[in-house]
Image (cartoon, rainbow, N blue to C red):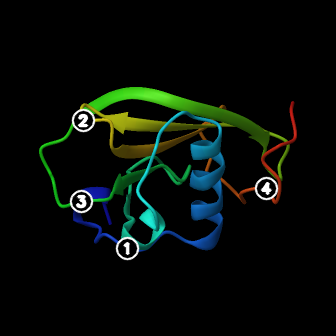
């Protein structure tokens, strides 16, 4: 099923853990309990794990800027880069996950603080 027809859902615990880590690495300020409002929609990225992020019902959004990034090694030894982006209004927009060989992500790591 293509991503444009996928329903919004709550993020998984691992997805939320990565988003929270990237937020701490940025200077963005979010309202208290923002994670309770957060819904996500998977992108059509061949299984790498990228997500559109929603804190409101505003659908008239477009990419604004990248606010943080981290990298890690997937279970198969391939480098992965995860970027957190906001929209033109400064609200969470997307979690962009890029596995450098374009294969599907196997698993998010337990610790994002490990440098490569």
Which residue appears farthest toward the left when viewing the image? 60
Which residue appears farthest toward the top when viewing the image? 65
Q: Are marks 3 and 2 in contact (CB under 8 Å)?
A: no
Specify few, some or many for label 4: CA neighbours under 10 Å numbering under 14, 14-19, or 20 or more. Answer: some
Specify few, some or many for label 3: CA neighbours under 10 Å numbering under 14, 14-19, or 20 or more. Answer: few
Q: Which residue is mark 2?
A: 89
For the residues carrying marks 3 and 4, which lies nearer the camera in this image? Answer: 3
- Say which element carries label 3: loop
| 43 vs 97: above or below | below
Q: Which mark is residue 109?
A: 4
- Say which element carries label 2: loop
Q: Tag count in the figure?
A: 4
For the residues carrying marks 2 and 4, which lies nearer the camera in this image? Answer: 2
Specify few, some or many for label 2: CA neighbours under 10 Å numbering under 14, 14-19, or 20 or more. Answer: few
Instruction: Using the numbered discs, state the Cα–Cα distance from disc 1 to disc 4 in whole angstroms.
Output: 22 Å
Percent from the top left, x then y, of residue 25? 65, 37
Q: Which residue is mark 3?
A: 56
- Look at the image and tell me in which quarter the N terminus lies: bottom left
Mark 2 vs 1, N-terminal side: 1
Specify few, some or many for label 1: CA neighbours under 10 Å numbering under 14, 14-19, or 20 or more. Answer: few
Instruction: Using the numbered discs, state the Cα–Cα distance from disc 2 to disc 1 in whole angstroms.
Output: 22 Å
- Say which element carries label 4: loop
| 25 vs 92: above or below | above
Instruction: Using the numbered discs, state the Cα–Cα distance from disc 2 to disc 4 in whole angstroms.
Output: 30 Å
Which residue: 38% across, 50% down?
A: 44
Q: Which mark is residue 9?
A: 1
Q: Are marks 1 and 3 in contact (CB under 8 Å)?
A: no
- Say which element carries label 1: loop
Which residue: 47% across, 66% down?
A: 35
Percent from the top left, x then y, of residue 114? 87, 41
| Nearer to me, 56 or 41 | 56
């Amino acid at each position: 099923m293509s991503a444009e027809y996928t329903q919004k859902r709550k993020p998984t615990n691992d997805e939320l853990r990565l988003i929270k880590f990237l937020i701490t690495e940025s200077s963005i300020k979010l309202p208290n309990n923002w994670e309770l409002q957060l819904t996500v929609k998977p992108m059509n990225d061949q299984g790498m794990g990228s997500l559109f992020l929603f804190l409101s019902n505003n659908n008239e959004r477009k990419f604004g800027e990248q606010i943080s990034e981290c990298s890690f090694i997937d279970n198969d030894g391939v480098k992965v880069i995860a970027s957190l982006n906001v929209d033109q209004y400064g609200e969470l927009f997307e979690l962009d996950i890029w596995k450098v060989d374009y294969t599907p992500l196997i698993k998010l790591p337990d610790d994002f603080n490990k440098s490569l």
